[in-house]
Amino acid sequence: MSADKTCFVLLFSVCLLFNTMSASADDQTNTAKEAARLVKVLDSNAGTYDKAMACRRLAAIGDTTAVGAIGKYLGDEKLATYARSALENIPGPAADKALEESLKALKGDLLVGVINSLGKRKDKNATADLTPLLASKDTKVAIAAAHALGAIGTKEAATALQAAIGKGDAAVQREVGFACLMCARSLAAKDKPAAVALAEAVRKADLPENINLAATQLTIVLQGNAGLALLAEELKSEDLPRFRFGLQAARDLGKVATPTLVDAYKTLSDERKALLIAALSLAHDPGALPLIRAAAAQGSDPLKLQAIYSLGELDPVLEESDQLQVLGDLFGLVKQNHAEIGAAAETVITAYSSSQPSAKVKTLIEESTRKLVENEALAQQLAGLQLAGDCRISSITPTLLQLANHTNPAVKQAAIQALGGTTSSAALPKLIALTLKTVNDPATSDALKAACSRLPLEETARTLAAAMQGASTEQKQLLLNQLAALGGETALKTVVEAARSNDDALQNTATDLLGKWVTIDVAPPLLELAKTLDNNKYKIRSLRGYIRVARQLNMTAEQQLEVCRNTLAIAERNDEKNLVFEILRRYPTPQAVNFTVSLLKDKQLNPSASATLVTLAEQSAPIDADLMQNALQQVIATTANADLKYRATQQRDRIAAQSKQDEKDLGFQSLYDGKSFDGWHGNEAIFRIENGEIVAGSLDQKVERNEFLRSNKEYGDFELKLEFKLLGDETNAGVQIRTAEIPDHHEVSGYQADLGTGYWGCLYDESRRKKILAGPPEDQRDLPVRLDDWNTYRIRCEGPRIQLWINGVQTVDFTEEDSSIPLKGIIALQIHGNLVNQAHYRNVRLRDL
Amino acid sequence: MTKPSALNRRNFMKTAAAASSVFAVPTIIPGTALGLNGTVAPSERIHLGGIGIRRRGGYVLSHMLEQPDVRFVAIADVRADQRKTVKEMADKQNGDQKCDTYRDFRELLARDDIDAVLIATGDRWHATASMLAAEAGKDVYSEKPCAISIELARRLQETIQRTGRVFQAGTQRRNVSNFAHAAKLAQTGQLGKIHTVHASIYQLIDRHDWLPEEPEPDREVVDWNMWLGPAPWRPYNHAYVDGAWRGHYDFDSGAKLLDWGAHTLDICQWALDADNTMPVTYEPKDVPNDNVIECMYENGVKLVMRRNGWLGLGTCPVRFEGDAGWVETGDSGQTAVSSDELRASLPSPSSIPGTSPKIHVRDFFNCVKTRSKPAANEDVMARSHIACHAAAIAWKLGRKVQFDPVTEEFVNDDEANRMRSRAMREPWTV
């Protein structure tokens, strides 16, 4: 792949990370430069990919000056779409013009594309050119022209389209019809009569039914009240689709259509009455209530059913008195011994009870339900039991507990199920006792689970945990399942205790449940169990459960890494070790990349770690380019697998080329030429150039005092990137920013992006406040750093804000509050005095912000 | 056009939610009322066709085949192996050998005996195929994301309204009880005044590279030109066809943000009764290596799209926070709430996972018959999809953007507005 290709890829991804809030004058110049470069690509003999990506980027940033270069590709079968994407988005008449002109030059599919683009731009000036194309012999062209005119949507476009109604082949006629409707819809706001006339013209034309129906619906809706007569006619139609579209129009009209619907009702078949009632209830007009109640009382069964559900639909808009009447009707229907109608009525009663009913409504439901439960007729009793549970009527619980021992299995079953809905905290021990008596009956445990899922959490857990006392293993297993479904502190504690018990069956159940726990507080006990359990099976299961927490639950990147570290420390089998790499692949943070790199050193883990890093690169994981390159370099240096080495090399080269172009586009410039100290000054007895690197200090003897290699220029708002390598047992160096020279002194004064043992990534105030201003907690400072090796520093200063990253991991985000501190100064590379150590710096580059 | 008011929609869903959460009754309109008590006369069956059906599509189709009033009569797919698989699936259900197969779905749409289609291709095709189907007089169930750009979401909505078709987006969580209950807690004030809602998203990826060119297969085996459809040309590579198209700009939606976002932001809109609007600002947060986008509605309610920080309640979680409490739920069907008081109103644990379209497909077919609007209709789809795209654009730009929910344009932001649409490859016209 050419270098050009990669540069385009990054435009859409990496460079966005560096984007700033507003388009400054500088940005505009950069954009213009970039656009000019892309135009050159289009004018060159670059490959298809490069040109496609040039068009893509120009769609976002190109202006009139790019139109000519893009227009050349409107006739290119591979690139036409890319070119049109650009032209569709470039503002100004030049793009319209380029598209208009190509209308004459192009034929067939490519012509269709251009017509579509003109439609997308709603280019009114193209109306005259598009109109004759409606008569094109190429059906696709004629259809595209119709769509484009429909999208343009002006009166002129409408006139052209209306004149074309009924002409051409069937497909064109259909599309012209729809295009007319498109026009009518856009004209409606400004010129309703014209819109209605156009919709009428389509309606009266000899066109397929689906267009005619759409036109009719539009004609009715556009006219509002004046459309009701036509609506009434449609509702009388023999044709079912026509009737249905009438209902659709009524829906769009809203409540004004209610009287028309009610009028139409009487003469309809029951099937259509049901459809009409559904439409009426969906309009939520309480005016429809009498008709719907009547249908629920007297209609044929299917109509009754629809009416019952529609009564449910009306609930939110009904007055309390109406609700009470409706509920009276519904309880009446429950008693009619018609299974399906009874079930529907129960559903709707439940809906009323669950939508914050008034006290009177609640009482009515409760009393009517109680009567049903106490009814001697089986069907009614069963209906009552169902309602008691679904409406959660807790006062019926004692009756239900009795019926749970009923001789009739249907009654027994229904009562148990209802207990799930009615049981209160006070009655919970009784339900638990019932459940423990019948450990193998799923009905009771389901009921218990249902009750527990809505009762107060910790209180419920304590009640369940208390029942563990003296219970059999089987009963305990049931309780553990219930506790796990509940979650929370007490539940966790109880299940963990069971995992530690010396009952194998309980351990089995408990470790299984802990492996499915949904909150992360399960992680510490699982780690503990993985370390301490004797039984290997449960030990491994606990470890896998522990890893799962990091894979699936709400953990921070830090916590996830901790799981990885802990797991690798105790895992004995490759299976579990490999799961760690799955986490690292799944959450590609800079910390994770650094951690994975650190694993390369371990011979056993190297293959998996290498594969993980290569995969991350291949999937374009959102990782800082410097960090990723560095990581891949380590893979190349350490892997024994030729394929991985090849892939790593490919990715490293891709990312390197990409980031180079990226930095160029962002305006990064090198501050160090690799061979001289041009632009710098300092003690050249200490600072020297070796292998193109800036080196200071020695590994044989102490550097006497702090020394700094200082830039000649000052910098205010900037982003600085460099690479560093520190050697020595105890090291210290750093990068001064916004710093002042102290005349005739070896020291300088100002911020230092610090480096070295105990100070990695901190912001230190050198010779000024003489303290660490910000930085990671002490025990985490060396986490991102690779000792004795190359690392990257990224330093960003903007106004009072200073941010630091080492190897892509942010270590500082500091805002200066002392307004007397200067926000401008030199840059200087440090070697610290009084230590035997050596600092290497290279690849120093900067861009102004 | 009169748009259905928020009130209608809300109440419809509230009742549907109440009914489904307590009883798992599909929707407000029972089968029997539509004439499907037991057996359905062949003449009254909805004739269904399928376009581009593989894994997710196959799962949705399996629920559609269960419907007594639906008969699946034809499959169109660019892959011969998929045509065969789906035909076998349908024939087995229908007890005959009559399911027709097409390479080019336009032949399927040209049949006038087909009432509705299931569209489950990759993202690049959804809107175009939906619009062509609507103009051909078919009702449409389309898998999400239904539109690959803001402009297409808008046009799809217009086309569905203009043609008078029924449209259901495959955002089935609107018809899954635990999501419905969580939304209800927010809508009915049980969480107090809502200040923040959270929508999960998956890792964002925006690839612009081309996979290495491979020889194009015979088009009767895999029709690459048809597979690309309205997406721009690029050289063939088998991996795209096998599913590796995800994350590629030309084929995916909003840098993959819509993969989950089309569901989760949609549920947030619903919970806020905000189906007729969308957030007005979208701001990607500088959280290292996490995708966090904070959005704000005009009334000050915050919507946070984020990858991490969820309880373990399954995929596609959402969370609603008010000044009196919070609720969080996900695909496992479990729901977590902030207080015992809120626990008290929880429906019994559901056995239907968030991924199940069981009730959602029934909702669609009911509406095909009654011509009412299903839960994830074109209006609901357009707004939540457009909001997702706006968030993805903010992420791509790496800065805050402002959006006007009425004009559906970014405010004084040429750069962002130029990301609202892409050209469609010729000769596709909708």
Image (cartoon, grey):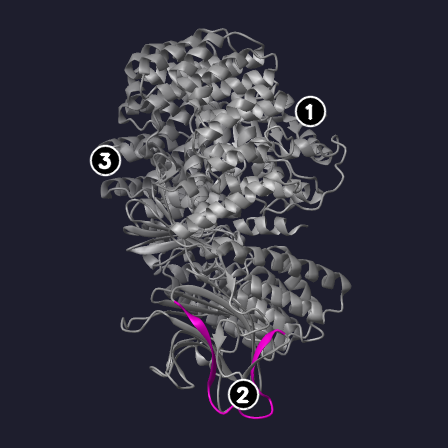
The tally of labels here is 3
Label of residue A320 in the image: 3
Provide the residue span drawn in magenta: A692-715
Q: Earlier in the sequence, mark 3 or mark 2?
A: 3
- Which of the 4 image quadrants contains residue A653? bottom right
Q: Is residue A707 magenta?
A: yes
Which residue appears at 32% of the width and 45% of the height?
B297
- Amino acid tagged 3: Glu
Q: Is residue A177 left or right of residue B190?
A: right
Is circle 1 on the same chain as circle 2?
no
Asked if one can make out residue B215 in the rendered structure from this viewpoint, the answer is yes
Q: Residue A14 versus residue A238: which sits nearer the camera?
A: A14
Q: Are marks 3 and 2 in contact (CB under 8 Å)?
A: no
Residue at mark 2: A730
Residue A131: where, in percent of width, then height? 49, 13
Mark 3 or 2, closer to the camera: 2
- Amino acid tagged 1: Asp
- Amino acid tagged 2: Glu
